[in-house]
Image (cartoon, rainbow, N blue to C red):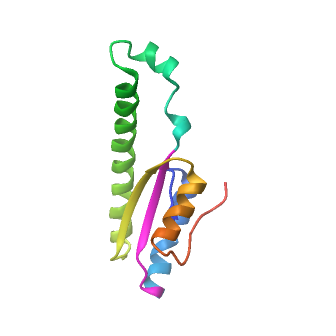
Amino acid sequence: MVPHDGSETSDKALSHAPYLSKISGAEVVVLNVIEDEIIPPSALLAFIRPETPLEKAKQDLRNALEVGVKQMLERRIRECKEAGINKVSYEIRTGNPVDETLHLSEEINCDIVVMSKK
């Protein structure tokens, strides 16, 4: 599994995935976590979109973020496939990145998490 936030350091970690996948035959799962704190508080949303109910405004913003993240991850998945990874997928979660990385690693019985430090 490779946690990926769209940063250059995440790209560096992901660049090691083809090698690891080829030597082990492992599937690569790229994880992106949209942090809860990225969604602005209700008071701010009320000023941004006063005509929209707050919960709908939050969901609309979350949906827009997910569309952008999905596009970014699909580009990375294409690059992985071009680098020779046959089994590669992605997962988008919302929450705390550390918690969601741990949860997914347990759910998929992950053997290794490839990350780089900032």
Residue shown at 40% from the left, 22% from the top: 54
Q: Name above or below for residue 49 compared with residue 24.
A: above
How many marks can you see? 0
Above or below — where is 47 with respect to 7?
Answer: above
The quadrant of the picture occupied by the C terminus is: bottom right
Q: Position of residue 85 (x, y in %)?
A: 37, 75
Q: Position of residue 31 (x, y in %)?
A: 46, 59
Who's the residue at 38% across and 61% down the image?
Answer: 90
- Residue stretch in magenta: 24-34
Q: Quadrant of residue 13?
A: bottom right
Residue 35 visible, this angle: yes
In this picture, residue 84 sits left or right of residue 42: left
Q: Position of residue 60 (x, y in %)?
A: 34, 31
Check if residue 27 falls in the magenta segment: yes
Query: Which residue is nearer to you in this view: 22 or 29?
Result: 29
| Magenta stretch secondary structure, dominant | strand
Residue 12 in sight here:
no
Left or right, residue 33 beside residue 73: right
Check if residue 29 falls in the magenta segment: yes
Q: Position of residue 110 (x, y in %)?
A: 51, 74
Q: Residue at x 59, y 64 (%)?
A: 115
- In the picture as drawn, the residue positioned furthest to the right comes out as 118
In the picture provided, is 7 more to the left or to the right than 67? right
Residue 37, compared with residue 101, is above or below; it is above
Name which residue lies at 36% across and 33% down: 59
